[in-house]
Image (cartoon, rainbow, N blue to C red):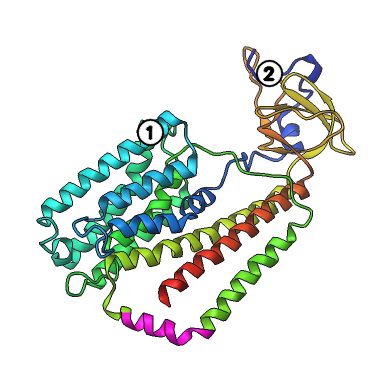
Amino acid sequence: MTAHAMTMDAAIEGPNSPAEARSESPPVAWRGYESPWVLAAIAAAPWPIWSLIALFGIPGGGVLPRSQGVLALALVLAVMGVWTHRPSGRSATRWFLTVLGTGLLGELLANALTDMGRAPGLGAASDLQRAGTIWLICVTVYEVAPIVAASARVARSERRSLPLDLTAHAGFLLAAAGAYAWQPTWGTSWFVSPWLAVAIALPLAAARSGPDREAATPTPHPRGGVLFGLAGLGWAMLGLVVVARLGMIRESLHDMRWGVEPADGVLLVIPMVSALLSSIAAAALLVRARAVRRTVSGTISEVGDGGVTIDRGGDEPTSVAIERGPLPVVGQRVTLIGAGVHPPGVGPFRDGAPQLRARRAWLGSPDELARSLRQRAARWLAWGAVGAFGVLLRLL
């Protein structure tokens, strides 16, 4: 008997045919994991820390004049992965050392190719070489980081998300196209530098460098609607500052007409990426909040070994096997996350009645779960405004 098999107290009393079972319960949609966009937003959220690390190592930062920036960006990725996925101490150490070792090798290689910074390097390459190199660097960071995470046992396998993959690779192609169209001036001022392109790729790579993570679904706050007001106030204040300082912003953009130093470009794009990913994460949570309102829910009428029986109101009580998490008590209202009809797991021909299973039971109604997700979306909208203020500060 499997660990999650139900006893006779909570045996699955499914309908007579698979077709009837599928008509009673929607197919499995959301399994209760965080969206990859939320993970990417979490990775980019501490942008002041990432900016401080980049300031020490990116060329033009003025702190380490001989640094090529590879080690600094590797340090950002290493800390970003630990911050996002919170692995065990042993896995975190292996991940950290592997990423830093790779960054140190890249630093030594870059110094060798540029004669310790005295040769122009990639800035003197042709347009096609520059564009191809930047594209290759971004793809390498995005695709190799999950492999390193799997080898360090931060994740069991390389995490894939089609929307994230399509967006990331489209962004890498755009960065390569920008590098092809706008060559660096005087060899040091860039429009699209490799450091800037990697800074965009880092949170996307960090989002993939870990296991599926349980979505945060806290109990909604009774006054959680205030969060949307705070987020709206933050964006409104941002708009007022932009209008008031429009002349200074125009002057800053005019000064950038010949490009910027690599460090200035990275310090500008890091909060910009955080603001963008925070807004996308908020949109993803709002879409999820709308979808979960149709999730199966009911009141617990009986609790068995590894499963419950819920009263959905009007229908016959339904027995549900719960895969993970604590079981609720009788009388509680629950919403089933990851609910769906599964084929039977017993019998020589596996031809028994289909089973209704759920990944976990969340205490509360679907409307409360949706409200919890909306409140998280409001927090991300507010943090997106903070990131936008960071961009504005760089322009003033």
Q: Which residue is mark 2?
A: 5
Residue at position x 49%, y 63% in the image: 276
Q: Which of 317/211 is in front?
A: 211
**Can residue 249 be found in the magenta stretch?**
yes
Query: What is the x, y in percent for residue 254?
Result: 34, 83
Residue at position x 73%, y 47% in the image: 369
> Taking the image as drawn, is residue 173 in sight?
yes
Disc 1 is placed on an element classified as: helix
Instruction: Report the predominant secondary structure element of the magenta stretch.
Output: helix
Q: Which of 161/348 is in front?
A: 161
Question: Crowding at label 1, few (<14), some or many (≥20) Cα neighbours within 10 Å?
Answer: some
Circles 2 and 1 in contact, beta carbons < 8 Å: no
Q: How many marks?
A: 2
What quarter of the picture does the C terminus occupy? bottom left
Residue at position x 74%, y 49% in the image: 220
Picture layout, residue 196 above or below residue 184: above
| Magenta part of the chain | 244-255
Q: Is residue 380 left or right of residue 177?
A: right
Q: Which residue is mark 1?
A: 93
Q: Is residue 304 left or right of residue 140?
A: right
Residue at position x 38%, y 60% in the image: 171
